[in-house]
Image (cartoon, grey):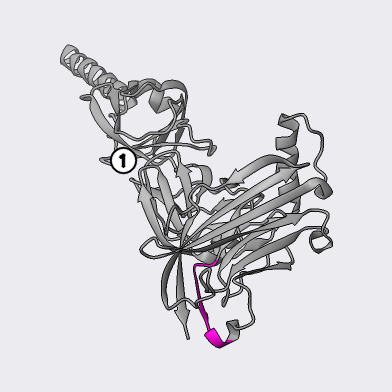
Amino acid sequence: MKNHISRRFSVFCLLFSVFCEAALIKSPVPPSAEGHFVRDTDGDGVADQIAIKFLNPIDSAYLKSAVDSIVISDNFVLAGVTPKKNMLFLEVVGRGNVTSCVFATLYQKGATPVKLSLADSLAPIPVSANVFAGSGMNADTLVVSFSELVEPGNIGLKLLSKDGSEKDVNYKTVVADSKNLKFVLDRKTSENLSASDVVWASRGVALDLSHNKNIEKKLTLSGVSPFRVVTNPKASFNPLELRAAPIFESSFTALGFEFPENKIGMAVDFGSDEFLKSLDEQLAERKLGSASLENVSIRMDMSVYSHSGEYLTSSHLNVKGSDAKVAGGARVFFFWNFMDGHRRVAGSGVYLVRTTLQVFYQGKLISKDNLGTLHAFGVVRK
């Protein structure tokens, strides 16, 4: 009887020790079916962290005892692991932006390996902003490029002047084209663009294919020439008011002055800071010294044709930097007064106007702008 009791006690002790040991081994915590992603924590456009979600909380002790390894399908190099609640964050050395599927395979003790799809949570990064002049009859287009394929968001683009103040910016349409968003500008916005302007791509201007909003960034505006020709695409006139008017005439106003609505032709900001800065750069290339407005002159040419291409009239305007009218800089207007070379008044319709601007320094040609300068002008005769 005594030996029987002793054997039963020994079996109980053995079973107790087995159960205690089993209790110390944690069952593998299964990963969530979704919620895993690649992300960019510092906003530099490079994937630097992978996040894996579990169904229950995990800690460092669990990782040490239960997780064998995690294998990433892409060429990320793991640099560190941090568990936090039910998330596991793996610091990585990435390969840049993530535009295709990335997978992680989780190996845990006592569990079948699980393949997890990692979503792309990297935000698109604005890369550049360029203005492309409308060739022929097209409007100017502001093209903002991003680090990956994008589509328009629901936030508007902003434009900042050199002094940091916000400028009005309006566009007719926004078109997504691969990694670019193309903003088709209205005339007033296009006319007031400056080479020193900054484009502010606010967060939400663009979305990638995973609907991640872009990183907010300011971009220097490129493609705006300081020798740019400004035009007005449509105007109306009263023939009775043209009796004493010349076929072409000029006018001088403050820099950036808006094109008169009842006039048609071309305008140039002559002698502005940007004008002289750009001229300085071109003179330096030719080893001609620093620019002085007194030694600068411009020539503005304008030719007018009917919508069928019939030549009607042409003229040019020469302006010297030594002229008192442009002291300190001025917007120089060169208008066509709706008449052909025989002073016959034009009818309502569309006219083709070719403009050319030449910039001279001490009599030497420095710049000639005649690319994409065939404009379609709409004229309404009252």
Query: In the figure, residue 336 lies in which quadrant?
Result: bottom right
On screen, residue 9 versus residue 184, left or right, reads left
Comparing 247 with 357, the one in front is 247
Q: Position of residue 253 (x, y in %)?
A: 73, 68
Comparing 246 with 15, the one in front is 246
The reply to whether residue 378 is visible in this rendering is: yes
Magenta span contains residue 165: no
Q: Quadrant of the N terminus?
A: top left
Note whether 256 is above or below 226 in the view shown.
below
Q: Position of residue 104 (x, y in %)?
A: 31, 27
Kindly identify the residue that appears in the image at 55 percent across and 56 percent down.
Answer: 355
Residue type beneath disc 1: Leu
On screen, residue 186 versus residue 365, left or right, reads left
User: Which residues make up the magenta segment?
Assistant: 232-240
Note whether 216 is above or below 335 in the view shown.
above
Q: Position of residue 266 (x, y in %)?
A: 59, 62
Q: Label 1 belongs to which residue?
A: 55
- Secondary structure under tag 1 reads loop
Q: How packed is label 1: few (under 14 Cα within 10 Å), some, or many (20 or more)?
A: few
Note whether 1 is above or below 277 in the view shown.
above
Q: Position of residue 117 (x, y in %)?
A: 28, 34
Kindly identify the residue that appears in the image at 39 percent across and 60 percent down.
Answer: 309
Q: Residue furthest front?
A: 342
